[in-house]
Amino acid sequence: MKGSHANRKATKEEMTIATQVIQQAYPEYDVVWGSHGDYGGGRAPRDHTLSFRLRDNFGKYHSNVIWIAPESLTKINVAWVIKMVSGGTSNKARSRRR
């Protein structure tokens, strides 16, 4: 980082670990990663905050957008993922476009 104002970016290793944990929690779905720019730029808590959603083989989403800070990627566990995904999410598939 070049200063305290710089936002930390996630490494490939951190992304791989987080993806594996999410897939352990929901092996039937694909993990779709995003960032604040994917949702109009103003919805993320801060720059470089990452998000993920769960998608089935037919392209239907089965979770809301879950935000996570890059420095927290290696700290997540299966229980946290299940808690975050189940909070406010129904079991019915969501459309690709909202």
Image (spheres, rainbow, N blue to C red):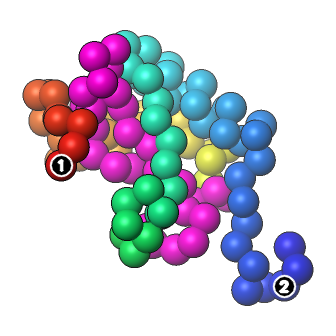
Q: From the image, which quarter does the N terminus lie in?
A: bottom right
Looking at the rendered structure, the secondary structure element under dot 1 is loop
Of badges 1 and 2, nearer the viewer stands 1
**Image spot of residue 2 (x, y percent):** 88, 80
Q: Is residue 41 above or below residue 16?
A: below
Camera-side residue: 55 or 13?
55
Magenta span main SS? loop
Seen at 66% across and 39% down, the residue is 15
**Relative horizontal placement of residue 29, taking residue 16 as reference (left or right):** left
**Label 1 crowding class (10 Å Cα cut-off): few <14, some 14-19, many 20+?**
few
- Residue drawn at 16 percent across, 28 percent down: 93
Within the magenta stretch, is there residue 87?
A: no
Q: For residue 92, which quarter of the picture?
A: top left
Q: Amino acid at mark 1?
A: Arg
**Any mark on residue 14, and which?**
none
Crowdedness of circle 2 by 10 Å Cα count: few (<14), some, many (20+)? Answer: few
Q: Is residue 64 visible?
A: yes
Magenta residues? 44-71
Q: Going from the N terminus, do you reach mark 1 or mark 2 first?
A: 2
